Image (spheres, grey):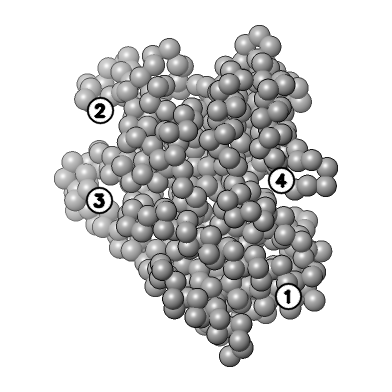
């Protein structure tokens, strides 16, 4: 065992938050030797908790035993199942319970939020996103502009970093809003940028957006379960997140949504409505006129998919037990160690901000051929990372199941395949 490997194992043995790796199903490394892989793709799809299969099986068993009566008689009655997720989800994102709801998928929720909060009028018509926004966000905001009869080329502003830089500067976003904010209807950035891993200063930018007269929403796909959030205290208007990345709830899992309490009871806000957006006290009266509750549930549409909510509930229970502050502290330790090891590799460029406070649990590196490099990392070294064409590889040392030894393996492998 090398000195470096002994160092990594010592760090694991003495870390204040021991790994919960044994609570997750770790894939075997490619190649058939059955060694566990070093998994750094949790920012794309998180690993399955061992408790998930049993929880889903319970719902299947209740369905078999009760049929339709499971809505009221199941061990976790389906008619109110989504309520079980409300408080842990609120704690996860720093919200009040009535400000959050688990529903739909991320881009569906963003569209529902923009249907309510993107209301172009007069000169105030523009939507501001980052130039490296995830493609789904780009498509969503462009289609919203078209829906309002606007030209996306004029209505959508894509903020770019300074020449020669990879990440947006907070002061540059603030300066743009001070300069052109009277044309901005909606500021909707990613809380953690999917490509570079940059953690945005959400509190400062929310204040700046509001000072400019804009609505401020956040895409938290790469932030929820990654970094501590204080959505209520930051006065965010709305936010949406997926649960299949850092929240380990399975491919295409049910997403989450936040609406600030100052909006939830406002009848003047237009909504696209459905049955589950009716006040549960009168839902089964089957009235043709909807009665919205004073909660984020007012934006819900259909009755929740129980088999898909079960894994989300398992995940939220894990986060509740461990706590985001403890996970963030370990994330800083793991990511800092990996960054130090990557700094020794002369054949790569790290795109993620070097300041630990300005990044989440992700390091993005630039290499000559990302796809081929990722394939070699997996097949030759059992290290699973994520390629973004043409030249970016993303490594996410997720603190729930990644270890310092995993980071050691990743650094050694990357050095070997890029030599």
| Residue 344 % position (x, y) | 73, 72
Residue beneath label 2, please? 280
Q: Are marks 4 and 2 in contact (CB under 8 Å)?
A: no
N-term mark: 4 or 2: 4
Is residue 86 depicted above or below 151 in this figure? below
- Asked if residue 126 shows in the view, the reply is no
The answer to which of marks 4 and 1 sits earlier in the sequence is 4
Residue 88 placement, left or right of 115 = left
Q: Estimate the spatial distance between the alpha carbons at disc 4 and disc 1, rounded to whole Å.
A: 25 Å
| Local secondary structure at mark 1 | helix
Q: Residue furthest bottom?
A: 1
Mark drawn on residue 63:
3
Gap in angstroms between the C-alphas marked 4 and 2: 45 Å
Q: Residue at x 62, y 68 (%)?
A: 338
Is disc 2 placed on a helix, strand or loop? loop
Q: Which mark, residue 184?
A: none
Report the residue marked by disc 1. Answer: 415
- Residue at 78% across, 47% down: 165
Placement of 100 over or under 326, stated as above or below: above
In which quadrant of the rendered image does the N terminus lie? bottom right
Residue 230 at least partly seen: yes
Determine whether label 1 and label 2 are within 8 Å by CB.
no
């Amino acid at each position: 065992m090398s000195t470096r490997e002994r160092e990594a194992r010592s760090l694991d043995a003495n870390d204040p938050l021991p790994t919960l790796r044994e609570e997750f199903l770790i894939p075997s490394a490619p190649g058939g030797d059955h060694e566990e892989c070093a998994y750094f793709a949790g920012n794309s799809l998180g690993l399955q908790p061992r408790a998930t299969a049993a929880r889903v099986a319970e719902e299947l068993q209740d369905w078999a035993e009760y049929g339709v009566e499971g809505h009221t008689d199941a061990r976790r009655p389906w008619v109110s199942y989504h309520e079980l997720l409300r408080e842990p989800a609120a704690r996860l994102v720093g919200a009040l319970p009535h400000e959050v709801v688990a529903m739909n998928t991320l881009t569906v929720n963003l569209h529902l939020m923009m249907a309510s909060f993107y209301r172009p009028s007069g000169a105030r018509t523009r939507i501001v996103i980052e130039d490296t926004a995830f493609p789904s966000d780009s498509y969503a905001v462009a289609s919203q502009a078209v829906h309002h009869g606007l030209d996306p080329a004029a209505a959508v502003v894509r903020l770019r970093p300074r020449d020669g830089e990879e990440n947006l500067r907070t002061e540059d976003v603030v300066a743009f809003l001070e300069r052109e904010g009277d044309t901005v209807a909606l500021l909707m950035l990613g809380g953690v940028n999917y490509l570079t891993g940059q953690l945005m200063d959400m509190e400062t930018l929310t204040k700046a957006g509001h000072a400019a007269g804009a609505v401020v929403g956040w895409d938290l796909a790469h932030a929820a379960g990654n970094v501590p959030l204080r959505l209520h205290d930051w006065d965010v208007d709305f936010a949406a997140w997926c649960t299949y990345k850092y929240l380990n709830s399975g491919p295409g899992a049910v997403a989450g949504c936040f609406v600030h309490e100052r909006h939830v009871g406002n009848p003047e806000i237009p909504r696209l409505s459905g049955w589950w957006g009716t006040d549960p006290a009168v839902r089964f009266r089957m009235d043709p006129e909807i009665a919205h509750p004073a909660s984020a549930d007012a934006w819900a549409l259909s009755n929740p998919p129980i088999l898909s909510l079960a894994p989300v509930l398992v995940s939220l229970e894990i986060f509740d037990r461990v706590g985001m502050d403890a996970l963030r502290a370990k994330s800083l330790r793991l990511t800092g160690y990996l960054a130090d090891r990557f700094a020794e590799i002369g054949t790569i460029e790290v795109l993620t901000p070097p300041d630990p406070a300005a990044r989440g649990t992700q390091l993005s590196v630039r290499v000559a051929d990302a796809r081929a490099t990722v394939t070699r990392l997996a097949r030759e070294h059992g290290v699973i990372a994520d390629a973004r064409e043409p030249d970016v590889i993303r490594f996410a040392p997720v603190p729930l199941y990644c270890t310092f030894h995993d980071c050691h393996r990743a650094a050694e492998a990357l050095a070997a395949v890029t030599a």
